[in-house]
Structures are given as C-alpha cells and as structure tokens.
Image (spheres, grey):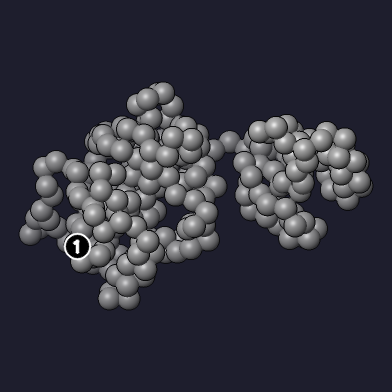
Amino acid sequence: MKLLYLIIFIIFIGCSPKEENIYSPQYTPSNTTSYNSKSKLKPYEVLGRWYYPREVKVGDTFTGISSWYGPNFHGKLTANGEIYDMYGYTAANKILPLNTIIKVINLSNNKSVVVRVNDRGPFVKGRILDLSYAAGKKIGIDKTGTAMVKIIVLSTPNTPKKLISYKKPKKNGKIKIQIGAFTNLSGAKIFKQEYSNYYKNVTIQKINNKYKVFVTGFNSYESAKNYKIKHNIKGFIVK
C-alpha cells in the first residue's frame, strides 16, 4: 500500500502544492464505506494531504475548471496502473472512482467529450479535472489551457454494462506522422515526391505559414507508432 502512495506521489510531484478541494460540501468517508486493495474508492495521500474518493451515481454532475495534460506524462503510469496515452480519451480526477465514465462539457463553447477516469489529479488550486490531450483538444482546451466545464457521470465501475452509454471514438484516419516542415512549397513538394516511394499516403498541409509533410491515414496512435517503428521514420505522431 505504501508503494502505491509513493508511486502516486512521484507522478504528481511536479504539480503545485497549493491545492484545495473545491467540491462542496466537504466529503467525509462514512464508517460504512469499505476500502480494500481492489476498491476504486481507495484513499490516497499526495504532498501531505489525504484524499477520499467518493461514491457517485449515474446522473451526478459537478462544475469547475478543467485543464489538460500531455507530453510530460505520456507513457508514464496512471493511478489505476495503466500507461497514460495522451491520444486516448481519459481524464484525471481527485475523488471520482477510477474507471468512472463521464461526459465533459466546455461551458464556453458547448463542445463535449466522453472520457474514462483512470488517473488522479489535478493537484492544482481551483481545478477539478485534467483531460488527456486528445480529449482536451476535442473541446478546445488545448488552445485555452483551462476552461469551466460541467461533468456528468454516465457510468460507474458498478453500473450494469447494459446501462453504460460510453462509446469508443470512431476510427477516422486522422492520425498522422509528420516527417518534414518547409518554408517554401517547392521544398515540400520535392520532399513529398521523394518519400512517396517509401511511405503510403504522403501529403502536404500548410500550417502556421509552414508547409508540413505528413504520412497520413492512421486510425489510432498505436497503428501510427507501429508503422513509424517498422519503417524507421524519424518524425513524430500528431492528431
């Protein structure tokens, strides 16, 4: 048990120690609540403060500020033992049971995304949620950094499967590998022509006054990663 607390502490050591629980009222675990090694409601300690995840039910709502987290945590361990994938649809929350499915609505633009809670945090004052990069991008938080959101509980770890409304994101082939960037279009065209002999679906896109060359058409981060490794591509994966 102490090892788990240490792992959680290390994961969030870079976060600000000035953190507060903005849920109201303050939650105190009842004497009848059972916490064991398999429970999704296991209390934990971060930076000298104890947190007590609480039971929720389908339809419960919360409102507060959400942020997003990405590259610095990509590939590292999450609180429920998974490997964090910034391109997946997940989130970190301090008190919701792990594996709770929630709908997150950005109140500034009404965009929404469905995610699964698989991590703890954010341990930053005034925030209640940390979305993965992909989830944050879908509702526009990747540009603003933070946003006021509404959280709606869609299912809990104890919800019967037939009542769970969570759906995996549809495959859309939008994930790609950037292999080059040029100031002039002519240079990008030469690069594209050369690498079209080696890679499939090589395209040019103008982004921020740069002509960027991509290998496109991947339905998931993993498929792009496998292709990148197989063909020894030096570029990086983007969505």
Residue 227, percent from left and from top:
74, 54
The vertical placement of 83 against 163, above or below, is below
Q: Could you tell me which residue is drawn at 38 percent across and 30 percent down? A: 106
Residue 56, percent from left and from top:
23, 44
Q: Could you tell me which residue is drawn at 18 percent across and 43 percent down? A: 23
Q: Is residue 54 left or right of residue 192?
A: left
Residue 166, percent from left and from top:
43, 38
Q: Nearer the viewer, residue 213 or 211?
A: 211
Where on the picture, by quarter, is residue 172? top right
Q: Which residue is at the far front?
A: 183
The amino acid beneath tag 1 is: Arg
- Crowd band around label 1 with a 10 angstrom C-alpha radius: few (<14), some (14–19), many (20+): few
Q: Is residue 180 visible?
A: yes
For mark 1, give the secondary structure.
strand
Q: Could you tell me which residue is drawn at 76 percent across and 48 percent down? A: 179
Q: Could you tell me which residue is drawn at 38 percent across and 38 percent down? A: 146
Residue designated by label 1: 49
Q: Is residue 197 left or right of residue 85?
A: right
Name the quadrant of the N terminus.
Answer: bottom left
Q: Nearer the viewer, residue 36 or 117?
A: 117
